[in-house]
Image (spheres, helix red, strand yellow):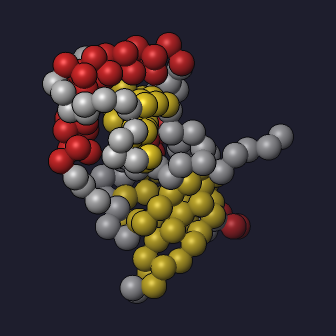
Amino acid sequence: MKTPLIDTINELAVSVLEDTDMFLVDLEIKGSDNNPIIWIYVDTQEGGVNIDQCAKVSKQLVFLVESHEVIIGKFTLNVSSPGLDRPLKDRRQYAKNTGRKAAVVHSVDGESKKLNGVLVEVRESGIVLEADKGKRHEITWDDLAETKILPAFK
């Protein structure tokens, strides 16, 4: 659900990330009206996001939120990389996860199906997942509901 507060913070976050190699993946506002807790999830197309990058984004974003008087009073801002427990939200996240095992929820003839496999290719039209016995499944972006990267245990 979009709200004016989410839209405004989204715009400010995108402006902070504009001259970096990071991009906004997701934004959540939790907590109460008197003490909102804002979660900003950022990622890069290659590699990861470190704590120093998150701290820099957080500092700049807090300044903008306060100077634009987006929130009057107390608020908490958390900037983080998405982590493995969060689904991929932005198409740019898929390329760097090629070759990794993923759990995908997608639509097949109007029904929701779950499929586990290796993300082998990212295309303009969608993704290719290789499941058991090398069977490849082409899933269009329109049919893709959720993708989570599965941790690899050695």
Q: Is residue 93 visible?
A: yes
Residue at (16, 24) in percent of width and height: 68
Figure quadrant of residue 71: top left
In screen coordinates, is 87 left or right of 7?
A: right
Residue drawn where x is 23% and y is 43% of the image: 5
Which of the 4 image quarters holds residue 13? top left
| Residue 96 drawn at (x, y percent) | 49, 37
Task: Reply above or below: 53 against 28.
Answer: above
Closer-to-camera residue (136/83) = 83
Residue 56, quarter of picture: top left
* Residue at (32% x, 21% y) in the render: 62
Q: Is residue 144 above or below residue 20?
A: below
- Percent position of residue 1, x then y: 29, 59
Q: Which residue is drawn at 50% across and 13% down?
A: 52
Question: Looking at the image, which is closer to me, 36 or 153?
Answer: 36
- Vertically, is 96 above or below 132? above
In the rendering, at what x and y percent does residue 88 appear? 46, 49
Res 42 visible:
no
Q: Which of 3 and 134 is in front in this view?
A: 3
> In this rendering, would 33 be left or right of 14?
right
Q: In this view, does 6 lie to the left or right of 77?
A: left
Residue 147 on image: x %, y %: 51, 57
Q: Is residue 152 left or right of residue 72?
A: right
Q: In the picture shown, does residue 18 fall above or below 118?
A: above
